[in-house]
Amino acid sequence: SYELTQPPSVSVSPGQTARITCSGDALPKEYGYWYQQKPGQAPVLVIYKDSERPSGIPERFSGSSSGTTVTLTISGVQAEDEADYYCQSADSNGIVVFGGGTKLTVL
Amino acid sequence: QVQLQESGPGLVKPSQTVSLTCIVSGGSISSDFYFWSWIRQPAGKGLEWIGRINTSGSSNYNPSLKSRVTISVDTSKSQFSLQLRSVTAADTAVYYCARDVPDSSGWHFDYWGQGALVTVSS
């Protein structure tokens, strides 16, 4: 299986825009997905199929894809957005891969 | 609203087998569309997908764990299960069950259980 690469940490001030990238060779062919995980909680899906937002997820969360990189953008970051964020994809055989996770710190 | 709940022993000795069960409620486990997956997370580390199954018995596993893993499903009890054999301390983790949704070019997890901590120690 292949790997997905994320930055270990991203820091932003409240109200600013946070961008978290995820790179992987299969991303031009396979969708990217994003999960938010707060301490002691299960992950929550925030973006699916590169840029779709599940119901109940605030509009400030958006996703995009370009080549081998997918990006999670959080506009107008709030303190409650501080969490770990994981990208996820799968290879052509359906084998799921997660990125190593990015810790978002709201300063 | 689909809900998933993991259960199983919290402590297992090295070389033994971990057996976990996930009960699905609020929705049918018997849909041919969805699959059901296990995912784990060691303390302070990232997520690792273990494998999936559907109620037709179709399954696939993470190649890194395939030789030690069996996932099964019991539709009469609305549950699916994980067996992980020959465990070591490296298998200590929170184990999550999740509903696995196929897309045209990918898979994602839309509902998750709360997680069950499994510690491997003598």
Image: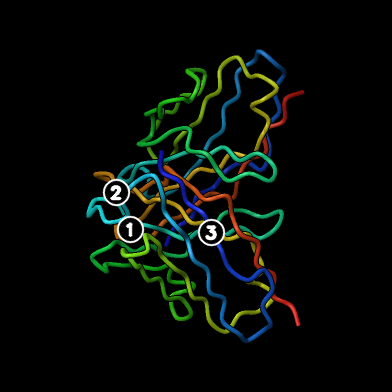
Rendered image coloring scheme: rainbow
Label 2: which residue? Answer: B102
Label 1: which residue? Answer: A94
Q: CA distance from mark 1 to mark 2?
A: 9 Å
Q: Does residue A52 lie above or below B84 as drawn?
A: above
Residue depicted at x 54% and y 56%: B96
Are labels 1 and 2 on one chain?
no
Dot 2 amino acid type:
Pro
Which mark, residue B122?
none
Q: Are marks 3 and 2 in contact (CB under 8 Å)?
A: no
Dot 1 amino acid type:
Gly
Label 1 marks which chain's residue?
Answer: A
Q: Quadrant of the C terminus of chain A?
A: top right
Q: Are marks 1 and 2 in contact (CB under 8 Å)?
A: yes
The quadrant holding residue A67 is: top left
Secondary structure of residue under mark 3: strand
Label 3 CA crowd tier, 10 Å (few <14, some 14–19, many 20+): many
Secondary structure of residue under mark 2: strand
Label 2 marks which chain's residue?
Answer: B
Dot 3 amino acid type:
Glu
Front residue of this view, candidates B101 and B4: B4
Label 3 marks which chain's residue?
Answer: B
Q: Position of residue B35 (x, y in %)?
A: 32, 56
Locate residue B44 relative to residue B3 in the image: left or right: right
Label 3: which residue? Answer: B6
Residue depicted at x 42% and y 64%: B51
Q: Does residue B82 lie above or below B100 as drawn?
A: below
Secondary structure of residue under mark 1: loop
Q: Looking at this view, name the residue that lies furthest to the front.
A: B76
Q: CA distance from mark 1 to mark 3?
A: 24 Å
Front residue of this view, candidates B102 and B95: B95
